[in-house]
Amino acid sequence: MLKEVALSIGLAVGLLMAQGAAAQVFKCKGSNGETVYSQHPCGPQAQEMKVRGAKAPSVSAAEVANRDAVYRSTDLSDAAIAERNCLASSRAGIYPSAESRIAGYQRQIAGLNASAERVNNNLAGATLDAGIRAQISGLQQSITSEHQVADTAMNAARQRCADQRRDREAVIGQKYNSQTP
């Protein structure tokens, strides 16, 4: 008997939870006097029960403002991360190739310096030494030029990445400012 009542109550609760606000639930007396719940009238003494749907939780203006502040902060952080990634990608594309060329120039300079040390101390040696020093000077100018080109390219990349971030931040600002009532 107690199991039947518990089962009936469980069934009723399940019906109440499964049905929407428009659902009908009837309370009846079973053949042994126990309370039974049903979707359909189960006899002349069936009593219709009022079923209330679960009310959606209301969100306060402060909660909405806090949520929007978190979303905005996250979006702004994403824009900063995108800028950092843009800079890292640019740096990886610019400096390694320049550094490789510079290393090649430096190896050439080291070889020329070694050749200059073996030059004879006479007029022919002085002429050869002057030629070697001119080559070294030209390679040093090439190194300086490589640094300038790489730095100029990186500055342009910094500007491009900053512009992209600024554009993202403007879109974010418009997005969240348009949501303000």
Image (cartoon, rainbow, N blue to C red):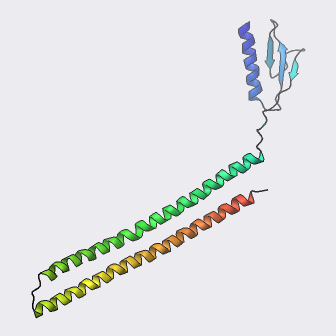
Count the marks: 0
| Residue 118 location, quadrant | bottom left
Q: Residue furthest bottom?
A: 123
Percent position of residue 55, x then y: 79, 35
158 left or right, relative to 33: left
Of residues 104 and 122, which is closer to you in this image?
122
Q: Is residue 84 above or below residue 151?
A: above
Q: Is residue 81 above or below residue 17?
A: below
Of residues 13 and 119, which is closer to you in this image?
119
At 90% from the left and 14% from the top, the residue drawn is 45
| Residue 149 location, quadrant | bottom left
Q: Residue furthest right?
A: 44
116 left or right, relative to 89: left
For the C terminus, which image quadrant?
Answer: bottom right
Q: Is residue 6 above or below residue 167?
A: above
Percent position of residue 65, x then y: 73, 50
| Residue 164 location, quadrant | bottom right
Of residues 122 and 55, which is closer to you in this image?
122
At 78% from the left and 41% from the top, the residue drawn is 58
At 27% from the left and 77% from the top, the residue drawn is 105
Percent position of residue 173, x then y: 68, 62
Percent position of residue 168, x then y: 61, 64
For the N terminus, which image quadrant?
Answer: top right
